[in-house]
Amino acid sequence: PQANGTASLAGNRLTITAKGLKPNAVYTVWLVNMQPTMTKAGAGAPPYDFRTDAQGNAKYTADLSEPPVGKWQAIFIVRHPSGDPKTMDKMEDALMGKLM
């Protein structure tokens, strides 16, 4: 509940900084559309992951193949309780931001 973060774009480079996430945990970053149907794509190169430090802080940087604004509606950060970013079951939403 205390997690927050910022996402910025410089050309096609996405940089996300986050605080207050679960310490020493594995997260992945997704570009998502909610309407008209739910679609998603990983942001950057597979497996689109980062690990938080002992305080729950992290920085993720990825080069995107194209600018996400206008194509995607939101960025989602999800936690992988198993610690494996390739395990897609039991993922937990952690942060979400709308792309404008």
Image (cartoon, rainbow, N blue to C red):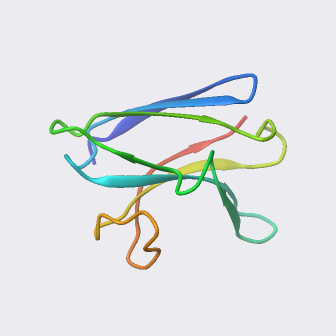
Task: Determine whether, in the image, residue 65 is placed left or right of residue 16.
Answer: right
In the image, 64 versus 18, the foreground residue is: 64
Determine whether 82 is above or below 41 in the image: below
Quadrant assignment, res 14: top right
Where is residue 60 drawn, in percent x and y? 47, 35
Relative to residue 10, is residue 61 drawn left or right?
A: left
Give residue 55's quadrant in the image: top left
Q: Residue at x 79, y 35 (%)?
A: 67
Image coordinates for residue 51, horizontal then vertical, percent: 32, 46
Using the image as rendered, state which of residue 49 and residue 71 is in the foreground. Answer: 49
Query: Which residue is farthest front?
Result: 46
Residue 81 or residue 19, whichever sits in front: 81
Indicate left or right for 8 with 86 as reference. Answer: right
Q: Is residue 84 above or below residue 88?
A: above
Residue name at image x 84 percent, y 41 percent: 70
Instruction: Point out residue 100 in the picture as x, y percentages from the top left corner.
Output: 73, 34
Farthest left residue? 54
Residue 13 rendering spot, x and y as whole percentages: 66, 28
For this orientation, the residue located farthest to the top is 10
Seen at 52% across and 57% down, the residue is: 47
Q: Residue at x 77, y 71 (%)?
A: 37
Total numbered labels: 0
